[in-house]
Image (cartoon, rainbow, N blue to C red):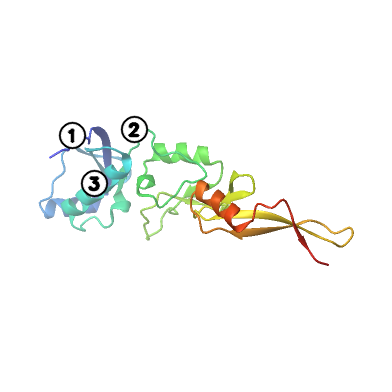
């Protein structure tokens, strides 16, 4: 039974090799509206409804496993899901292993690769026997950049907050050095209070020769 909030329609496409299709017939598993496409491959399409693409992928995989019970091998070998609402798009936080970014059709793959400007490529080399459920993989590792959330306060990608202090030496012609202090606070307001409490917000810290 379809839930009330599962109102968005997606389309599953199965590309089934010729011999595997007749295995389905032998197992009395018939697909409606199946046509013979290029390279002796049968193409079957079916709708699936969900409130976002990630849940649509989850439901599609569950349906595939329930309906075919391993006869066609892994779902990633034969199944893709379209992206009619363009929920999949490239940005600095794009995760190839996120369920919502898997099982992409050719049209979506092309669009996302264009957005990535060389940061991504297809996950599976043509002809490989080891199929991955990821559609794309990174060519360039993401740089982990700390984001400045307030003067001298920086937040790391894993949520840690650091305070950057400036040290200078009494020695002549010495360069200023920075010292980064990790805070226990996880929010900006708490971090500001911790900085004041620990006295880290003094203008500069002087160190001896």
* Distance between the alpha carbons at the discs numbered 1 and 2: 19 Å
Q: Is residue 146 visible?
A: no
Q: Which residue is mark 3?
A: 59
| Real-space Cα separation, disc 2 to disc 3, in angstroms | 16 Å
Mark 2 touching mark 3, by CB under 8 A? no
Residue 23, quarter of picture: bottom left
Furthest residue toward bottom: 209
How far apart are labels 3 and 1 at the CA level? 15 Å
- The number of discs equals 3
- Residue 192 falls left or right of residue 164: left
Where, by quadrant of the figure, is residue 14 drawn?
top left
Q: Earlier in the sequence, mark 1 or mark 2?
A: 1
Instruction: Point out the frontmost of discs 3 and 1.
Output: 1
In the shown orientation, is residue 140 left or right of residue 123? Answer: right
Residue 21 locus on image (x, y percent)? 20, 50
Q: Earlier in the sequence, mark 3 or mark 1?
A: 1
Pointer 2 or 3: first along the chain: 3
Asked if marks 1 and 2 touch (Cβ < 8 Å), the reply is no
Identity of the residue drawn at 13% across and 46% down: 30
**Farthest right residue?**
172
Name the foreground residue: 198 vs 92: 198
Any mark on residue 68, and which?
none
**Image quadrant containing the C terminus:** bottom right
Callout 3 secondary element: helix
* Residue picked out by circle 2: 84
- Front label number (1 vs 2): 1
Q: Position of residue 164 (x, y in %)?
A: 65, 54
Q: Is residue 121 left or right of residue 65?
A: right
Quarter occupied by the N terminus: top left
| Label 2: element kind | loop
Q: Which residue is mark 1?
A: 4
């Amino acid at each position: 039974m379809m839930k009330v909030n599962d109102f968005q329609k997606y389309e599953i496409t199965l590309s089934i090799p010729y011999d595997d299709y007749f295995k389905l017939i032998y197992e009395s598993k018939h697909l409606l509206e199946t046509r013979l496409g290029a390279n002796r491959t049968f193409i079957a399409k079916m709708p699936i409804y969900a409130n976002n693409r990630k849940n649509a992928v989850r439901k599609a995989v569950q349906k595939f496993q329930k309906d075919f019970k391993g006869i066609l091998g892994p779902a990633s070998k034969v199944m893709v899901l379209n992206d009619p609402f363009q929920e999949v798009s490239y940005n600095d936080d794009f995760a190839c292993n996120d369920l919502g970014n898997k099982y992409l059709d050719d049209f979506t793959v092309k669009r996302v690769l264009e957005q990535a400007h060389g940061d991504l490529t297809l996950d599976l080399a043509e002809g490989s026997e080891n199929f991955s459920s990821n559609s794309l993989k990174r060519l360039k590792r993401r740089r982990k950049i700390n984001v400045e959330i307030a003067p001298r306060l920086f937040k790391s990608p894993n949520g840690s907050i650091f305070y950057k202090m400036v040290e200078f030496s009494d020695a002549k012609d010495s360069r200023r050095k920075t010292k980064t202090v990790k805070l226990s606070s996880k929010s900006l307001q708490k971090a500001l209070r911790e900085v004041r409490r620990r006295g880290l917000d003094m203008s500069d810290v002087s160190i001896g020769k």
